[in-house]
Image (spheres, helix red, strand yellow):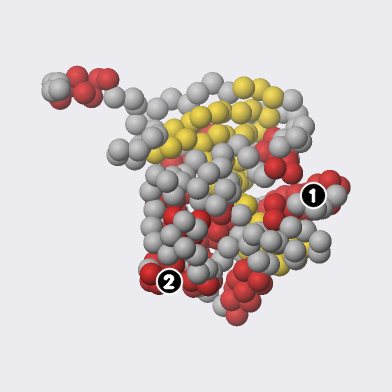
Amino acid sequence: MTAPTGLRGLIAAPHPDEAPLPPAAHLDAGVRLLRGVPYADVPGARPLELDLWLPDDAPGRPPVPLVLFVHGGAWRRGRREDMGYRMRGWEPGPFARIAAAGLAVASVDYRLSGEAVFPAPLDDLRAALRWLALRSAELGTDIDRTAVWGESAGGHLAALLALTESAGAARLRGAVAWYAPSDLTRQAGDADSPEALLLGAAPADVPRLAREASPVAQVRPGAPPFLLAHGEDDSMVDCDHSRALAARLEAAGVPVDLWTVPAADHVWHGLPEAQVEHLFGRTLDWVREVTR
């Protein structure tokens, strides 16, 4: 099928850089939600979208800090509106709570390992930061007071984003990684392991790529402050991943807070509800401090 060049331009969806923002839904607790906002068009792939949770407009209010949230799911699955199963029943939910505290949240899609291999998901996060910077005046956000927060596989990507030398990562004020892998080179894994599916091959077969995808190997002086939180009884991602990353950051002179949580498995499984609430609140306080 062929069509005139002009017609192709007419029927194409507006580019995310120029597309109008969707109308906001006004939630309780003074929060606005813009759901399903395209931020990148990747040739041959689905449009990448994010949800924006924003404090309600107030006349004369200065731009608010921003949290870029990255979901987990072993790089293979997951949804941008999910901060983990322990928080799915919260009312209001975790993102609404962050917005009610005066910060914006952009929870983002990224290409999963069934769609594209590394570094595609990291490239997507960089694209999200670029779009958020471009549209910050419309959104009422301060892109220069941005923190990235991820859990599990999303925490791994959040750490890499903060550690990579790029124009987007340079404006980050802090990075939070909850129970995240930090060293993919130590994962033996077969061809069906999450790490192999992310990399396109078992880590042992692609050692250079596995190193590029390992936050412990990307630590650099001058990186933004880090908060690492990990259950000591994590049966899916050993707590030593966060201990090793914390040690490497400290050796490089990067401010780092390491919270190891006794009796906690992955995704805070096994903890009382009150303790999960406390961990969330402490993390939010940390983010508010670094983006102040």
- In front: label 2 or label 1: 2
Residue drawn where x is 65% and y is 66% of the image: 238
- Identify the amino acid type marked 1: Val
The answer to whether residue 43 is left or right of residue 210 is: left
Is the residue 84 above or below the residue 176 in the image? above
Instruction: Name the spot of residue 283 as percent of width and height, x first.
Output: 73, 53
The answer to whether residue 198 is left or right of residue 85 is: left
Image quadrant where residue 59 sits: top right
Residue drawn where x is 38% and y is 35% of the image: 46
Instruction: Name the spot of residue 112 as percent of width and height, x first.
Output: 46, 46
Give the quadrant of the N terminus. Answer: top left
Q: CA distance from mark 2 to mark 1?
A: 36 Å
Q: Nearer the viewer, residue 254 or 116?
A: 116
Residue drawn where x is 74% and y is 53% of the image: 268
Is the residue 245 above or below the residue 72 in the image? below
Q: Secondary structure at mark 2?
A: helix
Is the residue 239 above or below the residue 49 in the image? below
Image quadrant where residue 141 sits: top right
Residue drawn where x is 55% and y is 34% of the image: 51
Query: Which residue bears the numbered disc 1?
Result: 276
Q: Nearer the viewer, residue 276 or 116?
A: 116
Specify few, some or many for label 1: CA neighbours under 10 Å numbering under 14, 14-19, or 20 or more.
some
Specify few, some or many for label 2: CA neighbours under 10 Å numbering under 14, 14-19, or 20 or more.
some
The answer to whether residue 61 is left or right of residue 48 is: right
Query: Which residue bears the numbered disc 2?
Result: 204
Q: Nearer the viewer, residue 291 or 231?
A: 231
Instruction: Name the spot of residue 28 as percent of width and height, x first.
Output: 74, 25
